[in-house]
Every structure is written in C-alpha cells, then in structure tokens.
Image: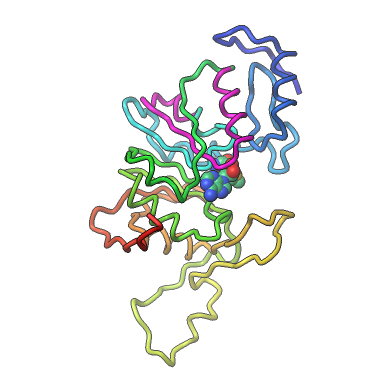
Amino acid sequence: MVEENLSLPESFSVSEIQGQVTALGPWFHNLNLGGVQTAPDHFLGDYPSLKWKSFGHAIPADLTGLTVLDIGCNGGFYSIEMKRRGAARVLGIDHDEDYLAQARYATKVLGMDIDFQKLSVYEVGQLRERFDLVLYMGVFYHLRHPLLALDLLRQHVAKDWFVFQSMMRGSRTKPQIEDDYPFWETKMFDHPGYPKMHFIEKNYSGDCTNWWVPNRACAEAVLRSAGFRIIDAPEHEVLICRCDPDAELHPIPAGLT
Ligand SMILES: C[S@@+](CC[C@H](N)C(=O)[O-])C[C@H]1O[C@@H](n2cnc3c(N)ncnc32)[C@H](O)[C@@H]1O
C-alpha cells in the first residue's frame, strides 16, 4: 500500500522503496518508509504501532543521552522509536540476518544512525556493555531456555530500565503465593493463576519456535526472580521493569555465560 511520500533525508523514489521492500520481505514489522507500508496485511493489524501506542507512555519520553539495546529487533520498529526519543546510541540485535537486512534498509531510508548486529540473546555477554534501557519484546516465548536468557540479560547488559513483552496464555489472575508450602500441600498448583508456563512441543499458531508461554503470574515471577522490579503494567502483555539493585542474582553455569 502506498500512502503520501513523506520527506526523506536521501532521495529514494517510492517505486525504488517499494521494490526493495518487496525484495527484503516478508516483513513482520509494518513500517512506513516514505509512504510504503512494509507489512500492510499483518495478522495483528498495524503492528507493532498498535502495541507501541498501548505502552509508549510508560517509558521515558525523552531518552536524550541514554543508550538502548533492542533484543530481537526484527525490522527495527522499536529501535527507530527509541532513536526518535533522542537516545544517544541504539543497538538492535537479532539472530536472523533477513530481519537485520530489513532494519538496516529501513534506517537507511529514514536517515537514522542505528547499529544492528547479528547476535543471539544467549550471546549478550560478548557485548561487554550495559544499556540504560533494554527492550525485550516478543522474544521470551521463542526460546527453549527463557530463564537462562533472562539471567544473562540482567547480569550482562541491563543497567536500569527493562521493557518486557511476552505472549501470555492462561489465567490473568494473581493468587497470593506463600514463600513456602509443606511437601504434602499441593492444592495451589491447581489454581489457574499459580505461576505456570505452557510448553509447546510442536506448533502454536503455525510456529514451531513458540516454546514456552507463561501465564501472567509466571511472567511477573520470572522477572522478579531474575532480578527485576516491576514498576508498571501498561497493558496485558507488557511489563515495565527496573533493575532491582537488592536482588539476589542466580549464578549462571560456567560455560553458559
Ligand atoms: C515475535 S518477533 C518480535 C520482534 C520485535 N521485538 C517486536 O516485539 O515486534 C521475535 C524476534 O526475536 C528474534 N529472535 C528469536 N530468537 C532469538 C534469539 N535467540 N536471539 C536473538 N533474536 C531472536 C526473531 O528473529 C524475531 O525477530
């Protein structure tokens, strides 16, 4: 779909952009590149613009001077929004070269200085850098080892803000959970709101990379357990966190750091 041709820093014609967008597709992020929409038929609607509108107010409007790490950056939507908020440095990482090529092309068309690197979430220790704001959107449930990844992020790259989003399924209720129970007490495990992750052996929504889908209480519990303090929940899938300086961090097994 072609809309108005927005003014762009370099001269890219609409037909040139349309050609590159098609060549680099399919896109998961629906970006507006000079009037060309990259994923106009997204099954979630105008995604992730719609998501961003639901939680953008919950993180600082002015990121001037701050550094941002966007994990699983995909086509670059959130990296671009962070740069628009004035971040001094934005690094987007993804393990998929095709998505990184999209992100690089998008920022070239938009004339933005954003760094994109091929890196797995399990390799963040190699960055040897901490970031003021870490975005961790839509990656948790795609991992076979989601708790390892959370520990790595908290202990290697997170400095302050941690913005988390996961697909969640099951109950959204949050029962009171005690710190401990006697061995023979088991009733609480049957409560739908008890922290649970659903393991998907084969596919969910036609996607074999959907592995672990938490309910709401579980998402909150794993974040706290990794060393984050949840400060806001602007919508049902997004949790805004800060690093908890008093948290006891769990040692990461040697060789996995
Ligand atoms: C559902 S998309 C979410 C994209 C974007 N963060 C968002 O919220 O719109 C998941 C992204 O995570 C990336 N991803 C999945 N596993 C990864 C891993 N182990 N390391 C880095 N990126 C990963 C995928 O390539 C994909 O771009």
Residue 95 or 212: which is nearer the viewer?
95
Residue 139 part of the magenta-drawn span: no
Quadrant of the frame with the C terminus: bottom left
- Identity of the residue drawn at 56% across and 18% down: 108
Residue 94 part of the magenta-drawn span: yes
Q: Looking at the picture, does residue 174 appear above or below residue 162?
A: below
Question: Where, by quadrant of the figure, is residue 46 drawn?
Answer: top right
Q: Looking at the picture, does residue 25 appear above or below residue 204?
A: above
From the top left corner, tell me how far across and down residue 122 is, in percent.
46, 51
Q: In the figure, is residue 95 to the left or right of 180?
A: right
Question: Where, by quadrant of the figure, is residue 227 drawn?
Answer: bottom left
Question: Ligand 1 is located in which of the four quadrants?
Answer: top right
From the top left corner, tell me how far across and down residue 170 is, in percent.
60, 66
From the top left corner, tell me how far across and down residue 15 is, in percent.
75, 13
Residue 189 or 249: which is nearer the viewer?
249
- Identity of the residue drawn at 28% across and 53% down: 244
From the top left corner, tell me how far across and down residue 208 is, in percent.
68, 57
Q: Which residue lies furthest to the left in this view?
A: 246
Stretch in magenta: 81-108
